[in-house]
Image (cartoon, rainbow, N blue to C red):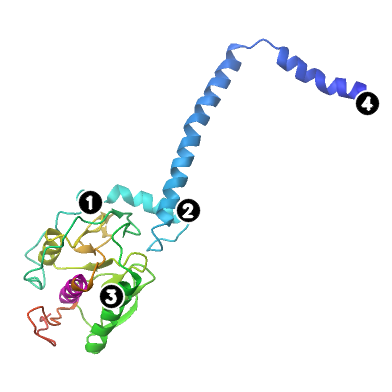
Amino acid sequence: MAALADHQILPLKGLLSTQPTSSNIHWVFYSTLIISILFPTYRLILHDYHSWLSLGPGGAPSTFTGYLRVNFLRLLTIKDPFVPPPLTPAANPRLGYLSRLPARSGPRPTVAGIVPQRQTDQKATPDLHRAFSNAIHSLAAKYPALLRTGTSCFEKNGLALFSSLPHHLNNTCRDTAEICHLHAIDSSMHLTLHPSDAALVIATGWGERHPLAGAGWFGQTLLPSGFVMVYAPRGKAELEVLMEIVKAGGWWVGGLGLGKMEGKTGLEERVDM
């Protein structure tokens, strides 16, 4: 048994007593260098992955594969989300819905992510989120021939408002006529607006364009150019403003004039197609 132990130990003794060679030193150096680079990179990716997961469910699967897909999309993002989409002569309706908006008080919330895109502070309270959801349902109930609620086509989850009309003016998500959708995790929303309305929303501090708004890949547009994130309401007065912006989304998608702040009610106008 002792002889067997000596036989096993001898190679180790030989290895330890071997004089270091140039190749051994290079191997140790490069191995240490690779580990010193890979380990911090791994930790950085892991932290970024968990930060992405913390934004909640969105249009991409909540898996590492989904995370890699979203990181590829970073290459296609617009430069400045506070620059409004261009107004082209072909825009239909020709004019926007919103004539004015009050300025949103205070600083903008911190916004993170692409898919999903969420705000990380200034979130609505549960009661205010419930009021927002109820307001969207109430708007659909008020115009049952024009509007319906359902699950968002963009997000694949969460409450969304759609035009019920067989034809609409501007495509949103796979020709579904989605007007807006509400995010449960922060009470912000996404919707598509007329370029003039998007410009007003951005200028008055109520929102910003999605990083992929108007971005394209091999001739395919990823999101409409007027796709905007509107920040969560911080009170009932702000919720009223946000519902006017929702109506502006209905104007762009379906040409629906659903009543304005001035006190008008009902279906005011349907743009001819």
Q: Are marks 1 and 2 in contact (CB under 8 Å)?
A: no
- Amino acid carrying mark 4 in the image: Met
Mark 4 Cα-neighbour bin, 10 Å: few <14, some 14–19, many ≥20: few
Q: Which residue is mark 2?
A: 64
Distance from label 3 to label 1 (Cα)? 29 Å
- Give the magenta range: 238-253
Dot 1 or dot 2, earlier in sequence: 2
Q: Nearer the viewer, mark 3 or mark 1?
A: 3
The 10 Å Cα crowd at callout 1, few under 14, some 14 to 19, many 20 or more, is some
Considering only order in the chain, which callout, 4 or 1, is on the residue closer to the N terminus? Answer: 4
Q: Which residue is mark 1?
A: 78
Instruction: Using a 10 Å C-alpha cutoff, classify the residue at mark 2 as few (fewer than 14 neighbours), some (14 to 19) or many (20 or more).
Output: few
Rendering quarter of residue 236: bottom left
Q: Which numbered marker is on residue 1?
A: 4
> Mark 2 to mark 3: distance in Å?
32 Å
Name the amino acid, label 1: Ile
Label 2 to label 4: alpha-carbon separation: 51 Å
**Quarter location, residue 58:** bottom left
